[in-house]
Image: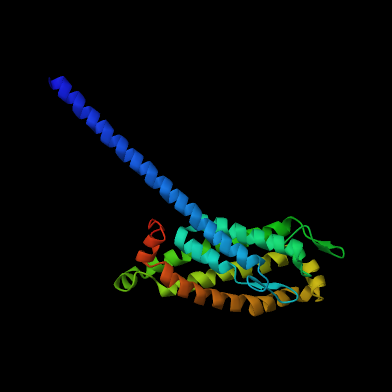
Amino acid sequence: MKNSENQRAETMKQTDGSRQNSGGVQSGSRFSTMSMVQVAIFGAIICIMAFTPFLGYIPLGFTRATIIHVPVIIASLLMGPKKGAALGFLFGLTSFINNTMNPTPTSFVFTPFYSIGDVSGGLGSIIICFIPRILVGVVPYFVYKLVMWLTKDLVKRKSGISSVGLVLAGVSGALVNTLLVMNLIFVFFREAYAAANEVAVSAVYTFILTVIGINGVPEAIVAGILTLLIGRVLLKKNVRERLGLRNDIGY
């Protein structure tokens, strides 16, 4: 009799365990699917911005200004650095395609498939095109986390969202892109870049600093403002829950 009761109890435990495991698998699968959908939505936004004239890439004659880093920064804050890096890679891919199919005089720094005169791109073009953009999806996350950690008591007393952190995350993402791209151009293509812009090689870094000032600073300011405005809405706990964003990122 005891053996029969023990077997019955053991069977019930196994059944409960199977149900829990099944529920866990279903929950994990649901979040995995939702996560892929979220990445796809941000990817679609990046592609629309990239391939709509004057929306994501703004031609300035000698180069292009961009605001495509903004959805990458927001995605990094919402979904973490891994998905942010993946979307940053997509950002780089759109730049690669744009500079190959619709080049400007300096497109050789972003694609090995474009040349102007005797100047052409190479491995350095791939590095310039992808590495800074991937980091755009990584650095803002850690900047925001750092600010949250430094101001955690103040943030807890308020909305749970750091406005300063959002601004700095946006600015850091934009500056990572601009500073790395322009300095890597100097490393890999200083002579070719100087020739393409009709400046002396000895003056090319001064020219690069000018581009950083004209492009990079306004891009950073815009990114900081947009990240603040969008982030304050999307990072709210109730909004994150409605969007299915798992609150496992640490804030």
Q: Nearer the viewer, residue 18 or 226?
A: 18
**What residue is rendered at 15% in x and 25% in y?**
5
Looking at the figure, which quarter contains the C terminus? bottom left
x and y percentages locating residue 192 in the rendered image? 80, 67
> Which picture quadrant has residue 137?
bottom right
Q: How many numbered markers are drawn?
A: 0
> Which picture quadrant has residue 193?
bottom right
Q: Nearer the viewer, residue 191 or 64?
A: 64
Q: Is residue 134 above or below residue 20?
A: below
| Residue found farthest to the right | 117
Instruction: Tell me if 36 is positioned left or right of 245 in this view.
Output: right
x and y percentages locating residue 132 in the rendered image? 62, 62
Is residue 100 in sight in this rendering? Answer: yes
> Which picture quadrant has residue 93?
bottom right
x and y percentages locating residue 212 in the rendered image? 65, 75
Is residue 180 in sight in this rendering? Answer: no
**What residue is rendered at 62% in x and 75% in y?**
216
**What residue is rendered at 50% in x and 52% in y?**
36
Q: Is residue 213 above or below residue 150?
A: below
